[in-house]
Image (spheres, rainbow, N blue to C red):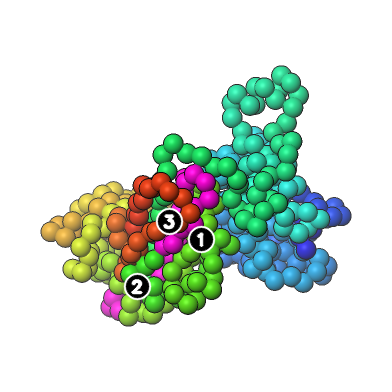
């Protein structure tokens, strides 16, 4: 299956490598680095690269590349899912997934990778099971380990590893029993110059934080589950129950986990939360141009749109800009030609506007095409698809847990063409 794993920073430096079978030379990464150089953005690097003797499968996450080396043909999504599990494990253990954190905890990262794969095949990828085998780092434990020469590796096999429910350890006890669910949706959209929707779809995820004693059996139901396409579940979910009744029935892992991901691609169901009036024009003869952008919330939005940010990659021939923002502030990097307008909250009574002049380099021709705008935004307590949790029931335990649901809508790849 998976022969080797390389962790690569944005500069192209390999700062961690792990081999499960034979050692693969670092030179195999040259094919990946070539593809990275050709890509405009890190996310544009092809996830699967074929080389004469290997397949290179990678993901880009938290400003790091996770690159696996495969010698035989395997389902790429299988490997991609494992790489995401590695990133989530680092995040879960150390609080963040970054080059500095990995270097500071190199020994423990190697211990975890050793347990997650056995001879190249995934073995223990559940956070609960790993935490019983390799205890998460604390300051006290680090001091004790240094003085006594012991390690964080547990002495006994995790109880969950031997049961039919490997994602949950036995004997869980809490003083306060609580279950929280976050419904997070990202809008991917392309709007044309007139504001008409060219493409719109929603990627959603239900994140859970469950801290319940014993072995609870939960049932989560939605008011409108028929909205959801292309659902993917945590292994704890009973799929047959979803197929027949459209409810989620599961014995949850202990702590934080992703319960399900889903997709809504019916364009008439996707409500675009903002409108953008924009005009970017360049004068004939290449002397300069004008920029005028206004962003406002749609009238159908009952919630406040916040965290609004507009990013524009201006043409390379731009010499300087002179703009005025009625709300928020803008920054411009003359080296990368990147304009970022940080607006903040949208006020329907007073729409934010950014306008001004653009100067081109002397003798430069008029740019052939106008740049597109990338929009970032956030809406609290709203799932833009209209998905709503109906109720959460618990069986198998006698206590009454505290339950909570939160909805968040964010912009994914949200582009406005000019």
Residue on which the image places disc 1: 250
Instruction: Determine the CA span between mark 1 and mark 3.
Output: 10 Å
Q: Quadrant of the N terminus?
A: bottom right
Residue 357: give x, y in percent of width and height.
28, 60
- In the rendered image, residue 401, in percent from the top left (x then y), is placed at 39, 47
Viewer-side label of 2, 1: 1
Can you give x and y, in whole percent of width and height, for residue 84 in the image? 60, 57
**Does 122 sit left or right of 212 as displayed?**
right
Report the residue marked by disc 3.
394
At x 70% / y 25%, what residue is drawn?
A: 145
Of all residues, the one furthest to the top in this rendering is 147
Q: Quadrant of residue 53?
A: bottom right
Task: Note whether residue 368 is visible.
Answer: no
Mark positioned earlier in the residue sequence (2 or 3): 2
> Does 192 appear in magenta?
yes
Stretch in magenta: 191-220
Name which quarter of the figure residue 405 lies in.
bottom left
Q: Secondary structure at mark 1?
A: strand
Image position of 236 with respect to 74: above or below: above
At 84% from the left and 55% from the top, the residue drawn is: 21
Q: What element does badge 3 sit on?
A: strand
Find residue 238 and report its image quarter.
bottom right
Which comes sooner in the sequence, label 2 or label 1? Answer: 2
Judge depth for marks 2 and 3 and give the one in front.
3
Q: Nearer the viewer, residue 159 or 282?
A: 159
Q: Earlier in the sequence, mark 1 or mark 3?
A: 1
Q: Answer whether residue 208 is magenta in the image.
A: yes
x, y (%) of residue 60? 59, 57
Q: In the rendered image of this protein, does residue 156 appear above or below residue 3?
A: above
């Amino acid at each position: 299956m998976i022969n080797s794993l390389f962790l690569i920073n944005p500069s192209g430096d390999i700062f961690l490598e792990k081999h499960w079978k034979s050692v693969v030379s670092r030179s195999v990464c040259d094919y990946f680095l070539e593809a990275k150089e050709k890509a405009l953005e890190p996310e544009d690097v092809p996830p699967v690269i074929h080389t004469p003797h290997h397949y290179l499968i990678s993901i880009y996450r938290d400003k790091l590349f996770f690159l696996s080396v495969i010698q035989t043909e395997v389902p790429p999504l299988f490997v991609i899912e494992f790489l995401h599990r590695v990133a989530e494990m680092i995040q879960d253990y150390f609080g963040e997934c970054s080059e500095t954190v990995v270097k500071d905890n190199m020994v423990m990262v190697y211990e975890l990778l050793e347990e997650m794969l056995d001879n190249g095949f995934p073995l223990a990828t559940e956070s609960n099971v790993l935490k019983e085998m390799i205890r998460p780092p604390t300051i006290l434990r680090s001091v004790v380990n240094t003085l006594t020469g012991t390690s964080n590796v547990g002495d006994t096999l995790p109880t969950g590893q031997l049961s039919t429910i490997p994602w949950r350890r036995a004997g869980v006890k809490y003083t306060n029993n609580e279950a929280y669910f976050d419904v997070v949706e990202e809008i991917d959209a392309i709007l044309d110059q007139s504001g008409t929707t060219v493409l719109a779809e929603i990627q959603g995820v239900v994140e859970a934080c469950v801290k319940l004693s014993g072995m609870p059996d939960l049932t989560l139901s939605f008011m409108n589950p028929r909205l959801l396409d292309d659902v993917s579940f945590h292994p704890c979910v009973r799929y047959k129950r979803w197929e027949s009744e459209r409810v989620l029935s599961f014995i949850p892992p202990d702590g934080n986990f992703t319960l399900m991901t889903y997709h809504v691609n019916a364009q008439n169901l996707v409500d675009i939360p903002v409108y953008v009036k924009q005009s970017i024009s360049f004068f004939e003869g290449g002397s300069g141009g004008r920029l005028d952008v206004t962003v406002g919330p749609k009238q159908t939005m009952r919630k406040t749109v916040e965290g609004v940010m507009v990013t524009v990659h201006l043409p390379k021939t731009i010499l300087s800009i002179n703009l005025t923002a009625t709300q928020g502030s803008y920054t411009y990097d003359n080296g990368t030609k990147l304009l970022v307008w940080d607006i903040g909250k949208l006020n329907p009574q007073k729409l934010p506007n950014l306008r001004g002049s653009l100067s081109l380099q002397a003798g430069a021709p008029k740019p052939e095409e106008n740049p597109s705008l990338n929009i970032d935004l956030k809406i609290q307590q709203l799932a833009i698809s209209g998905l709503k949790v109906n109720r959460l029931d618990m069986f198998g335990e006698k206590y009454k847990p505290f339950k909570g649901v939160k909805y968040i809508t964010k912009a994914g790849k949200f582009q406005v063409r000019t």
